[in-house]
Image (spheres, grey):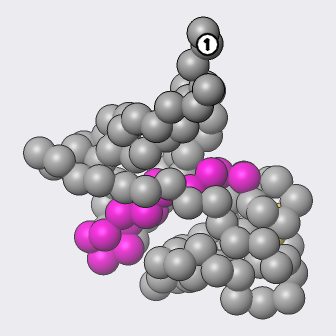
């Protein structure tokens, strides 16, 4: 059975405006992006061929993968060109007491 829980990632001050950073959450790499003070979280794997999005770059609210230059809208996760039709895999983000939390699904045994 899968359970949803909010997992604390970092203080909001750990990711500067218009920067991104990778965190390891229960063995999975999560990319947290700060666009003008709003935080978004994604699976760090590019939906195109699975390479790490962290090696790409952020231009405004567009995330550009560093491998084949697929472009995605950070706010919606939608692909913006023909490289891939698959959207970014996003995780809901919640800010509480200056900490970033993401909603994470974990499988529980029993
Ligand atoms: S792996 Fe990201 S564009 Fe190909």
- Rendered location of residue 33, percent (x, y): 45, 62
29 is within the stretch colored magenta: no
Query: In the rendered image, which quarter is residue 87 located in?
Result: bottom right
Beta carbon at label 1 within 8 Å of ligand 1: no
- The residue at 85%/88% (across/down) is 82
On screen, residue 89 above or below 26: below
In the rendered image, the quadrant that contains the C terminus is top right
SS assignment at label 1: loop
**Lateral position of residue 107 relative to residue 39, left or right:** right
Residue nearest the observer in this picture, 6 or 84:
6
Residue farthest toward the top in the current orientation of the protein = 110
The main secondary structure of the magenta stretch is strand
- The residue at 40%/46% (across/down) is 102
Q: Which residues are magenta?
A: 32-45
- Rendered location of residue 70, percent (x, y): 77, 78
**Lateral position of residue 65 relative to residue 26, left or right:** right
- The residue at 43%/45% (across/down) is 103
Query: In the rendered image, which quarter is residue 27 located in?
Result: top right
Q: Residues within 10 Å of mark 1 (few under 14, many from 20)?
A: few
The reply to whether residue 62 is visible in this rendering is: yes
Task: Look at mark 1 in the image and give the residue it sits on.
Answer: 109
Residue nearest the observer in this picture, 108 or 104:
108
On screen, residue 8 above or below 109: below
């Amino acid at each position: 059975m899968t359970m949803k829980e909010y997992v604390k990632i970092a203080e909001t001050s750990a990711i500067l405006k218009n920067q991104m950073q990778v965190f390891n959450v229960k063995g999975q790499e999560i990319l947290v992006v700060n666009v003008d003070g709003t935080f978004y979280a994604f699976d760090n794997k590019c939906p195109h061929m699975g390479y790490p999005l962290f090696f790409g770059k952020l231009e405004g609210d567009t995330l550009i993968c560093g491998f084949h230059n697929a472009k995605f809208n950070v706010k919606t996760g939608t692909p913006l060109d023909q490289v891939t039709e698959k959207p970014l895999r996003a995780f809901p983000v919640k800010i509480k007491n200056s900490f970033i939390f993401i909603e994470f699904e974990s499988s529980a045994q029993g």
